Image: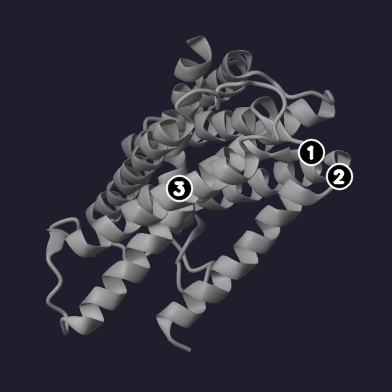
């Protein structure tokens, strides 16, 4: 099976899982969404820790970091409410600060173990904050009936840019017999200017389609009002470039760690960290776009 076929298959599976978190009844899909976030957080953090510290080193610490993320994601559900972002971060601090010092104590003057512990706390907060922001987008903003329209805008606007860049770059590469214009070959040799243009067009087009479908059928926050198509064009552009920054940053990390893929969980795509790199950056970008628009 070709890489494109494998990538297509994985994308269909992931989109099916996403559909379950979007279109089920609320009482079901909120658990589906939470479990999906927990799985992605666990897998991506596990891979990231392995890249930074070695896949077979400090296994107990790797388990702790990944399981702590699962606890962070699941904890608000036990209270039957969504935990706001900033109080949620306070909970993370309370949870992890104590255990981090216990880890430091357990390193027993081992510098390599101490570096692994510091890497672990950085990984924990990176994914913890991103997951909380994504959760905030999912629960808080703009619904069409029971469908989280703004969450769809965030996910599809980001991933359509990834997919569009890959498809356009692959097509142009085939037409030009491998003579694409490289974007940043020192970081990611496969990325091209042709892919950038195609991905940007895909991302903007998808955001405009979502706006057209949902703009007159909403309730909740009214940030979609006024200059809607202009706003969506700007959002599509920002989501594409934010996603590209996340993708390039992860590519740079992989080159630093001398690995090709963060993992091999997803055929044709690679690891879970490869999947969520663009979403991590865009969770910050999109959340503060929403904050700015709602503050107007």
Kindly identify the residue that appears in the image at 35 percent across and 35 percent down. Answer: 115
Task: Please name which of the two marks, 1 or 2, marks the residue nearer to the observer.
Answer: 1
Residue 145 on image: x %, y %: 79, 37
Whether residue 121 is visible, yes or no, is no
| Mark 3 surroundings within 10 Å by alpha-carbon count, few (fewer than 14), some (14 through 19), many (20 or more) | many
Compared with residue 293, is residue 185 higher up or lower down, i.e. above or below?
below
Q: Quadrant of residue 91?
A: top right
User: Helix or strand or loop: what does disc 2 sit on?
Assistant: loop
The residue carrying mark 1 is 146
Q: Is residue 125 left or right of residue 39?
A: left
Task: Please name which of the two marks, 3 or 1, marks the residue nearer to the observer.
Answer: 1
Q: Is residue 276 left or right of residue 152?
A: left
The residue carrying mark 3 is 158
Task: Estimate the spatial distance between the alpha carbons at disc 2 and disc 3, rounded to whole Å.
Answer: 25 Å
| Mark 1 surroundings within 10 Å by alpha-carbon count, few (fewer than 14), some (14 through 19), many (20 or more) | some
Whether residue 290 is visible, yes or no, is yes
The residue carrying mark 2 is 25
């Amino acid at each position: 099976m070709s890489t494109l076929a494998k990538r297509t298959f994985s994308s269909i599976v992931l989109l099916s899982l996403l559909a379950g978190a979007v279109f089920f009844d609320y009482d079901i899909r909120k658990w589906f969404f939470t479990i999906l976030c927990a799985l992605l957080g666990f897998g991506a953090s596990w891979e990231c820790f392995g890249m930074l510290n070695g896949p077979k080193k400090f296994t107990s610490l790797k388990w702790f970091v990944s399981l702590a993320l699962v606890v962070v994601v699941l904890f608000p559900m036990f209270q039957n409410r969504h935990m706001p972002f900033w109080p949620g971060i306070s909970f993370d601090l309370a949870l992890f600060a104590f255990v981090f010092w216990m880890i430091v104590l357990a390193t027993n003057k081992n510098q390599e173990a101490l570096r692994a512990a510091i890497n672990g706390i950085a990984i924990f907060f990176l994914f913890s904050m991103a997951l909380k922001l994504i959760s905030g987008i999912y629960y808080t903003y703009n619904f069409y009936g029971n469908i989280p329209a703004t969450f769809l805008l965030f996910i599809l606007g980001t991933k359509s840019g990834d997919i569009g860049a890959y498809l356009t770059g692959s097509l142009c590469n085939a037409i030009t017999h491998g003579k694409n214009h490289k974007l940043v070959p020192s970081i990611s040799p496969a990325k091209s200017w042709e892919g950038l243009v195609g991905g940007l067009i895909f991302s903007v087009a998808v955001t405009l389609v979502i706006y057209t479908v949902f703009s007159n059928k909403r309730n909740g926050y009214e940030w979609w009002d006024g200059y809607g198509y202009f706003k969506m064009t700007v959002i599509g552009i920002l989501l594409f470039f934010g996603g590209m920054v996340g993708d390039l940053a992860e590519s740079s990390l992989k080159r630093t760690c001398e690995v090709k893929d963060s993992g091999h969980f997803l055929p044709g795509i690679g690891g879970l960290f490869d999947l969520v790199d663009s979403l991590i950056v865009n969770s910050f970008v999109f959340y503060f776009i929403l904050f700015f628009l709602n503050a107007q």
